[in-house]
Image: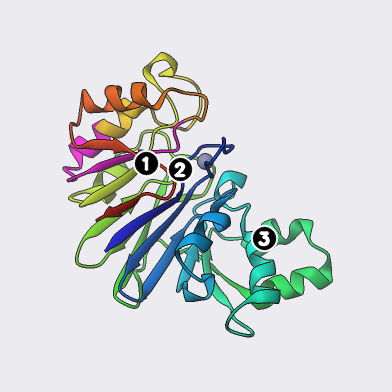
Amino acid sequence: MRLVVLGASAAYAGPDEACSGYLVEDKNTKILLDCGTGVISNLFKWLDPCKLNVMVVSHFHPDHFLDIYPLRYYYQLDATIPNFSLRVLAPKGALDFLGGILSDDSKKRFTDIFNFEDINDKIEYEFGSLKLRFCKVNHLEPTYAVAVIGKKKLVYSSDTGYCESLVEFARGADTFICEATLQEAHAGAPVEHLTAKQAATIAKKAEVKKLLLTHIWPGYDRKISLKEAKGVFSETVFLKENEVHEI
Ligand SMILES: [Zn+2]
């Protein structure tokens, strides 16, 4: 299993960056976790989007879904497989929310291409050699953390405040991608996001093997986030666009 970082930035993307997007691959199984601003441009560097088995939209904040609109035009007009359609696992109400800016005609094409399914956190999904599970976390209601399970286990926190359910969900993961929007200077801010230290605390409690910090606020010095996390959990790195990590 391997992870390709397509976007790791929070809220907006700086030069050569993109917002949230992670490609998880195992042989011919290809899963896209989130599709934020700039993700598609990076995705094209790695594969033809017609090779994707499924896309997950973890929640309805723009830094996690905006590139679904340009991706639609690729599938509609330039796809290597005519009439390609993609399963999209998203919170309930995806079509109303994402289709809200489209005309009726355009919405029809949008749904020909994207087959939206409500995420069910009580079941396990199977795509090729990989399984997906979901867990609600503390952010926009609802937001889902995702576990990708094959020979190894990868857990992606999505965006969240501190929650014990994420500790249980991430337990024993080989790779834990965790948001770390904030730094200690902003600890206690009234937003549902984690500091790097909190992300490391979850990683430690969950006894994961490796912590990959992501979604660090673009204006922050990432080295400070890394230092604050490593003080709690030494097996920590921060993610950068177009890196490949063996899971
Ligand atoms: Zn976000």
Q: Which residue lies furthest to the bottom in this view?
A: 82
Name which residue lies at 17% across and 45% down.
209
Residue type for callout 3: Pro
Secondary structure category for the residue under label 3: helix
Which disc, if any, is residue 31? none
Q: Can residue 146 be seen?
A: no
Residue at mark 2: 8
Q: Which percent across, then down, holds residue 228? A: 29, 22
Residue at mark 1: 239
Residue at mark 3: 70
Query: Does residue 215 belong to the magenta stretch?
Result: yes
Q: Which percent across, then down, holds residue 114? A: 61, 72
**What is the span of residues highlighted in magenta in the rendered image?**
201-216
Query: Does residue 147 belong to the magenta stretch?
Result: no
Residue type for callout 1: Leu
- Mark 1 touching mark 2, by CB under 8 A? yes
Q: Is residue 117 above or below residue 84?
A: above
Q: In this view, does 30 lie above or below 147?
A: below
Name which residue lies at 40% across and 19% down.
187
Give how far apart the Cα atoms at labels 1 and 3 are: 24 Å
Secondary structure category for the residue under label 2: loop
Q: How many labels does the image show?
A: 3
Q: Can residue 200 be seen?
A: yes
Q: Which percent across, then down, holds residue 55? A: 49, 65
Q: Which percent across, then down, holds residue 29? A: 36, 73
Secondary structure category for the residue under label 1: loop
Q: In this view, does 118 lie above or below 16?
A: below
Q: Residue furthest top?
A: 185
Viewport quadrant of the C terminus = bottom left
Give how far apart the Cα atoms at labels 2 and 3 are: 19 Å
